[in-house]
Image (cartoon, rainbow, N blue to C red):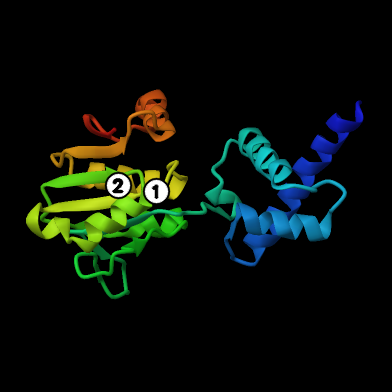
Amino acid sequence: MRENDAKAFVRVWKVMEMCYKILGEGKLVTQRELFYKLLSDSPKYFSCQRHVNQTIQDVVSLLRCTRQSLGIMASSRGALIGRLVLHEPEEEHIDCSILGPSGHAITGDLNQLSRLNLSSDARYLILVEKDAIFQRLAEDRLYNQLPCILITAKGYPDIATRFILHRLSQTFPNMPIFALVDWLSPFKCFFCERKHFLMLICILFWLFVF
């Protein structure tokens, strides 16, 4: 066995061992947090984040499970604002129409996102690529003039943002979804390549910024 193959094999076991400890403690960690744990525990095998990311993929494929079931929480950059109320069992509701321009930060805990009850009187869902544009629209309270929900991933869509987008499209199937993006955006390419796999939406209207 070549040295690189041997290291990859050991990495798989090290990641599974660390995930076992995390699950035993009833915790969730992000991929970045997992990297620092493994760097401290086994620096010989995990010298960079890429090693951890690839090994997580290998473990998920090997065990045919989700990252969440391994105790690995999606790291989210996303936010939303507008005509949406989030209800979590035994928690106070969050009215996203009265928040500041930064909006409501989307948690990376997919289990928590799946428990949310969503209510809205919005007529449109607008997916905004750029955070600066999102904040400008939020500052202008666009959703008061145009009944809508604004959501952003602040660039390339992360898992948690895609998950809540999927939940919104399932909860409000008659609400049209618009994407406000650059014409040559990798964000656009992402959805063009994966729209059927993600099963997010039936129809996506593109609003290009030149």
Give the total of numbered labels.
2
The quadrant in which the C terminus is found is top left
Q: In this view, does 197 lie above or below 170?
A: above
Residue 76 higher or lower than 3, as above or below: below
Report x, y in % for residue 67.
56, 46
**In the foreground, 186 or 105:** 186
Counting other residues with Cα less than 10 Å from the Cα at mark 1, is it few (<14), some (14-19), or many (20 or more)? many
The quarter holding residue 79 reads: bottom left
Q: Which of 10 and 141 is in front in this view?
A: 141
3D distance between C-alphas at marks 2 and 1: 15 Å
Residue 125 x/y as whole percent: 20, 46
Comparing 79 with 16, the one in front is 79
**Which of the numbered marks, if any, corresponds to residue 73?**
none
Q: Where is residue 31 in the image (x, y as percent from the top left)?
A: 62, 52
Callout 1 secondary element: loop
Say which amino acid is labelled 2: Arg
Circle 1 is placed at which residue position?
Answer: 153
The label on residue 167 is: 2
